[in-house]
Image: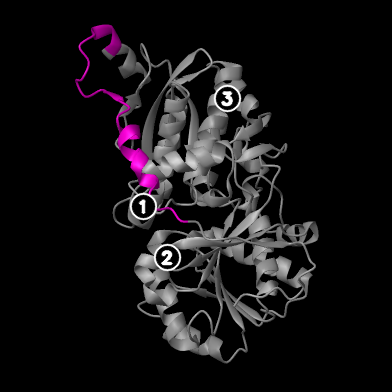
């Protein structure tokens, strides 16, 4: 049973579970919308073929050009996501959300007709984002003049590679999932002169529609307190700056909140098992375990061994950052994942209202009745931000980038908000999910400002 040690403190809102049965009935109607794929010999109009060839980006990592409007596309937006490995299903749903946004806009942004391509920043060998692939993708985007914006990346490490390349070319990039603080804001954890070093032309070309890890770390601390966790042990994936940064965000907020941290350590994603690691932690006196990292980093085995050595997630609570908040965590860990918690920045799909609720319903139909991944609506929102900016600025890259940063969204997929000068959203809720057959929302947390500052600093 979850408990709030101070019921008068208005920081945690407990959420009901949502039944998704029956929503998939809309899939057939949605699927009937036709997309015209160019570059595959499908068109009989020579001028059309030439025009689409000019707009299409020809790389090994990008799929075919898709366009469902009248005439020919004049501009291009792409998604840049890991389309292989454990993140495949999540990324595929994000792509569907972007295509839905384009369809609803009639494949136009103002007077500009817009085509779309889905690009992959992962490699088959690992199923993870890849530094060279991120570099090559961004270089291709920058050189391709019809390309006005990127929806991506998901992984913050890939974003840190792509942002400066795209910044030099004034290409706008709007992320549905990056959470590393240093992409936009200064922190004691920042390296290599970030964030300023990411913007060599002196202007910001990057925004994200999710709160950063300072909010997520503070939100996890808030939830840990309400679970009665006083002495957590923090684990992070070895040799991964994003995981290390998330751990530091949690530690900073935990110290501000007065928690008694009993230890910190890393896990090796290539290890065969973690029995020795958790045997060592068993003697530390922890009453909760915090994971900062990704399911892709051998997370399933990590969770299995945690339960084997320390007990199930009722006996020893397990809280994780958003890298574990996906169906593959449950699929890989199996029964040991039951009852673990994972945080995600922002509001869960079930809590969205108005336009957001309608979008969620359509997306659930498009994914064939599968559980909707948390970040899918956020990808749709990122696409709508880009379309709004293109409608405002036309087809000039620098103007589009400027328009993104001054966007004010009203009743969009994520509700009403605007971007701060750093490119962060002006809202900062954090959702806590609990694992069963799928991840379902358990609580929505709005962390105190003092904890957010401490997480950042």
Disc 3 versus disc 1: distance between alpha carbons? Answer: 30 Å
Q: Is residue 211 above or below residue 407?
A: below
Q: Which residue is mark 2?
A: 297
Q: Residue at x 53, y 51 (%)?
A: 350
Quadrant, the N terminus: bottom right
**415 to the left or right of 157:** right
Disc 2 versus disc 3: distance between alpha carbons? Answer: 37 Å
Q: Is residue 287 above or below residue 130?
A: below
Residue 94 % position (x, y): 43, 43
Residue 19 % position (x, y): 46, 56
Of the numbered discs 1 and 2, the one sitting upstream in the chain is: 2
Q: Which residue is mark 3?
A: 388
Q: Crowding at label 1, few (<14), some or many (≥20) Cα neighbours within 10 Å?
A: some
Q: Secondary structure at mark 3?
A: helix
The image quarter containing residue 413 is top right
Circle 3 or circle 1, nearest the eye: 1
Residue 308 % position (x, y): 42, 86
Of the numbered discs 2 and 3, the one sitting upstream in the chain is: 2
Q: Residue at x 43, y 53 (%)?
A: 20
Circle 2 or circle 3, nearest the eye: 3
Q: Residue at x 33, y 51 (%)?
A: 84
Q: Secondary structure at mark 1?
A: loop
The image quarter containing residue 187 is bottom right
Residue 41 % position (x, y): 19, 20
- Can residue 40 be seen here? The reply is yes
Q: Which residues are magenta?
A: 19-48
Q: Which mark is residue 431?
A: none
Of the numbered discs 3 and 1, the one sitting upstream in the chain is: 1
């Amino acid at each position: 049973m979850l408990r709030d040690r101070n019921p008068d403190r208005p920081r945690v809102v407990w959420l009901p579970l949502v039944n998704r049965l029956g929503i998939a009935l809309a899939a057939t109607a949605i699927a009937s919308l036709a997309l015209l794929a160019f570059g595959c010999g499908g068109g009989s109009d020579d001028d059309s073929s030439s025009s689409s060839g000019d707009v299409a980006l020809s790389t090994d990592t990008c799929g075919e050009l898709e366009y469902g409007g009248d005439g020919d596309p004049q501009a291009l937006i792409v998604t840049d996501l890991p389309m292989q490995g454990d993140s495949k299903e999540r990324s595929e749903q994000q792509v569907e959300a972007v295509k839905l946004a384009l369809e609803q806009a009639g494949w136009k942004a103002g007077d500009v007709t817009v085509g779309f391509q889905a690009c992959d920043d992962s490699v088959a060998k690992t199923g993870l984002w890849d530094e060279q692939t991120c570099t090559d993708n961004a270089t291709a985007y920058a050189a391709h003049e019809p390309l006005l914006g990127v929806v991506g990346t998901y992984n913050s490490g890939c974003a840190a590679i792509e942002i400066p390349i795209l910044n030099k070319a004034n290409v706008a990039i709007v992320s549905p999932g990056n959470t590393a603080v240093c992409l936009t804001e200064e922190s004691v954890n920042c390296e290599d002169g970030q964030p300023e070093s990411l913007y060599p032309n002196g202007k910001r070309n990057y925004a994200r529609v999710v709160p950063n890890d300072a909010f997520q770390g503070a939100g996890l601390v808030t939830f840990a307190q309400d679970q009665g966790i006083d002495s957590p042990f923090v684990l992070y994936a070895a040799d991964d700056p994003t995981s290390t940064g998330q751990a530091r965000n949690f530690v900073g907020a935990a110290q501000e909140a007065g928690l008694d941290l009993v230890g910190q350590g890393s896990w090796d994603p290539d290890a065969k098992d973690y029995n020795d690691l958790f045997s060592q932690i068993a003697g530390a006196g922890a009453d909760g375990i915090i994971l900062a990292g990704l399911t892709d980093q051998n997370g399933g085995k990590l969770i299995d061994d945690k339960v084997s050595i320390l007990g199930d997630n009722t006996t020893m609570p397990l809280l994780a950052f958003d890298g574990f908040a996906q169906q593959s965590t449950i699929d890989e860990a199996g029964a040991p994942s039951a009852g673990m918690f994972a945080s995600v920045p922002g509001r869960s799909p079930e809590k969205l209202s108005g336009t957001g609720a309608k979008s969620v319903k359509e997306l659930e139909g498009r994914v064939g009745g599968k559980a909707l991944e948390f970040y899918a609506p956020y990808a749709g929102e990122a696409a709508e931000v880009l379309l709004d900016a293109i409608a405002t600025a036309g087809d000039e890259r620098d103007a589009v980038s400027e328009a993104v940063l001054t966007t004010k969204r009203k009743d969009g997929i994520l509700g009403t908000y605007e971007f701060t000068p750093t490119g962060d959203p002006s809202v900062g809720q954090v959702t806590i999910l609990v694992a069963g057959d799928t991840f379902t929302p358990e609580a929505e947390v709005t962390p105190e400002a003092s904890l957010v500052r401490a997480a950042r600093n």
